[in-house]
Amino acid sequence: MSVRVRIAPSPTGSPHLGTAYIALFNLAFARRHGGRLVFRVEDTDQARSRPEHEQSLIHALRWLELNWDEGPDVGGPHGPYRQSERLPLYQQHARRLVEAGRAYYCFCTPQRLDALRTEQRRLKLSLGYDRHCRDLPLDQAERRRQQGEPHVVRLRMPLEGKAVLQDTLRGAIEFEYGLLDDQVLLKSDGFPTYHLAVVVDDHLMGITHVIRGEEWINSSPKHLLLYERFGWTPPIHTHLPLLLNPDGSKMSKRRNPTSIDYYRRAGYLGVALRNYLGLMSYPPPGEDEKFGLEKWVEAFDLGKVSLGGSVFDLDKLLWLNGRYLREDFTAEAVLGELKNWLFNDEHLGQLVPLMQERMETLGDFLPKCAFFFARKVECSTEDLVPRKRESQEVAQVLQTVLWALEGAVPWSRDAVEGNLRKVGEFWDWPIREVTGPLFAAVMGQRVGPPLFESIALLGLDLTRARILDAMNVLGGISKKKAAELEEKWKAGKQK
Ligand code: GLU
């Protein structure tokens, strides 16, 4: 049986470094064993999935030269490769389970489930579905369904017994069925949940090995049960350790840039980043930590993955990137990289309209917009804090700016402006007291080209990194404070 592996990202945001790391290990495994890598888009979360996120994912992985054999953009014999285009398949499979008594229709309304949760919280019980519809006779349920009553399909979990996950790196992991909820498989809008879709697709696409992040370990017993209920053989599972911040916490965008787009926009080289990801929880193939994909794949052995954790260290990536630039690129090649990066007509053409009015001579262009080309900018407390305001206050305002910008979807100049205005309203600050610190954070200068346009062009990921740097200059804000603030921000009221 030939090896078939897959990456199955959800296009719900900026392309994540973790996706590239998982893709790299799947690619190496496929190449090493003469197998194929499938790219499947898991876009069943209708509210959060967007085609532009899928595009940027594809673009980002291609920039890292991580290529797949089958996928939505290249086709293949097991398509479609986008889950939103496979709905009838999930519906048929859900039905098959219902008819076999392995799953059931549930008509509980969102209101009932909310009330249930509130009551469980009040009584300090564990939260979960109370299996209210589990024993409805099928003919009754069928009638209600045919009359158009909204419903979901739930998996009938065994009330006792154990699922055993055989993980290639971790050995056997046991789960008590009794502790698991009757998982929703099909939502009331006819879309599957991740659990149903992943199992149906991995099976239909002939996936032999599932190599994914360890955050999915707890989902595995549901998947294993589904394989069993369908009468299918499950693939071999390997859960890779998560990427960590240097302090050992899970890598998150609140602390470190996690978007591949950030690294590209900040001027890193795709080869260096890919090389660095190959060192995550894995030993270098020889003496040197700098190595090409070929060499790495040749010696690849999944069993060598260490579970100790994989710290993503920006300084080390920077060091490696510098080595690539100095050791592997001719001056001509560097020039080519610069042009591809930002010194091209498209990007310069976007900047000129912002700069033209601010120039006396052509020589004013670059100094005034150097921040567009910088990996990072320096800013001082003095520039960041408006008169009569405190550093701590500004740090908190910048935190809300970050949330506001994250809400600017789809990303555009107007969305940036509209959402930044909400920050002013939230704090009851004049907008210039919000934009002033932002000029300093994003440009490293108090004045510059129009702010909203500039942020729109810099993109969310680079802007976020600069705002986080500025917040650090101001002493940062504690986790507790951030949590309190987030609650207020979500409620839209400061007091
Ligand atoms: N859609 C999941 C994700 O976003 C896939 C998890 C899996 O590989 O099973 O990562």
Image (cartoon, rainbow, N blue to C red):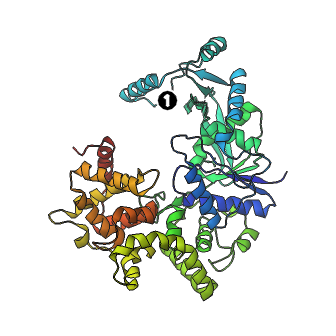
| Residue 108, percent from left and from top | 51, 21
16 above or below 111? below
Observer-nearest of 105 and 361: 361
- Taking the spot 55% from the left edge, 61% from the top edge, the residue there is 17
Residue reaching furthest to the left: 388
Answer yes or no: is residue 31 visible: yes
Quarter assignment of residue 361: bottom left
Seen in the picture, residue 13 relative to 183 is either above or below; the reply is: below
From where the camera sits, is residue 266 visible?
no
* The furthest residue to the right: 1
Q: Position of residue 416 (x, y in %)?
A: 38, 56
The correct choice, above or below, for 144 with respect to 486 in the image is: above
Q: Nearer the viewer, residue 54 or 164?
A: 54
Residue at 75% from the left image edge and 52% from the top image edge:
75
Would residue 383 be found to the left or right of residue 486 on screen?
Answer: left
- Return the x and y of residue 230 as percentages of the image width and height: 74, 32
Specify the quadrant that holds the C terminus: top left
Helix, strand or loop for disc 1: loop
Q: Is residue 454 above or below residue 425?
A: below
* Mark 1, residue position: 128
Judge by depth and name the residue closer to the eye, 356 or 133. Answer: 356
- At x 39% / y 85%, what residue is drawn? 363
Q: The disc labelled 1 sits on which kind of residue?
A: Gly
Q: Is residue 346 left or right of residue 485?
A: right
Picture quadrant where residue 365 is located: bottom left
Q: Residues within 10 Å of mark 1 (few under 14, many from 20)?
A: some
Cβ of mark 1 under 8 A from ligand 1: no
66 lies left or right of 353: right
